[in-house]
Image (cartoon, rainbow, N blue to C red):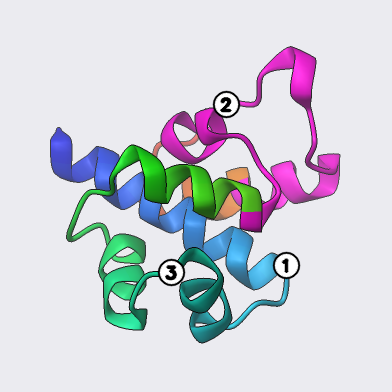
Amino acid sequence: MANDFKEAMGMRVKLLRNIRGYSREEVAFQASISVKFLYEVEKGKIGISAEKLVKLAKILNVSCDYLLTGTVPKIANIMEQHELEYIEKITCNANEKCK
């Protein structure tokens, strides 16, 4: 279960990074983390501290809730609808857990 959680969160980080047009190097630099660490987060191999999670969320312009759970708080819907639909589609296809 913990691995599934880390993999799903990592997938969201990677997809958002790609949607925003950022390289792994750019995000790692802005978040003050190594490229290898970001790679391992994106692959779901390691967890992340709250401090680093907040940095990634700010860089990717989403809430920490979204990175952690894949849900967008109703009061802070800062992602475009087409971005949400794309990420849901990709995540659903990768996990084969479609509605």
Number of other residues with Cα within 10 Å of mark 1, as a class: few under 14, some 14 to 19, many 20 or more: few
Report whether residue 7 is seen: yes
- Residue 27 sits in which quadrant? bottom right
Considering only vertical position in the picture, is 47 above or below 33? above
Give the amino acid type for the residue marked by disc 3 in the picture: Ser
Q: Which mark is residue 20?
A: 1
Circle 3: is it few (<14), some (14-19), or many (20+) Cα within 10 Å?
few
Could you tell me how far apart the alpha carbons at marks 2 and 3 are, in whole angstroms? 26 Å
Amino acid type indicated by mark 1: Arg
Residue 51 horizontal side relative to residue 54, left or right: left
How far apart marks 3 and 1 lie (CA) works out to: 18 Å
Name the secondary structure under disc 2.
Answer: loop
Q: Is residue 80 left or right of residue 12?
A: right
Q: Amino acid at mark 2?
A: Thr
Decide which of tag 3 and tag 1 comes sooner along the chain.
1
Which tag is nearer the camera, tag 2 or tag 1?
Answer: 1
Name the residue beneath numbered marker 2.
71
Res. 96 visible in picture: no
What residue sits right under mark 3 in the picture?
32
Q: Which picture quadrant has residue 53? A: top left
Q: Quadrant of residue 4?
A: top left
Q: Residue at x 77, y 14 (%)?
A: 75
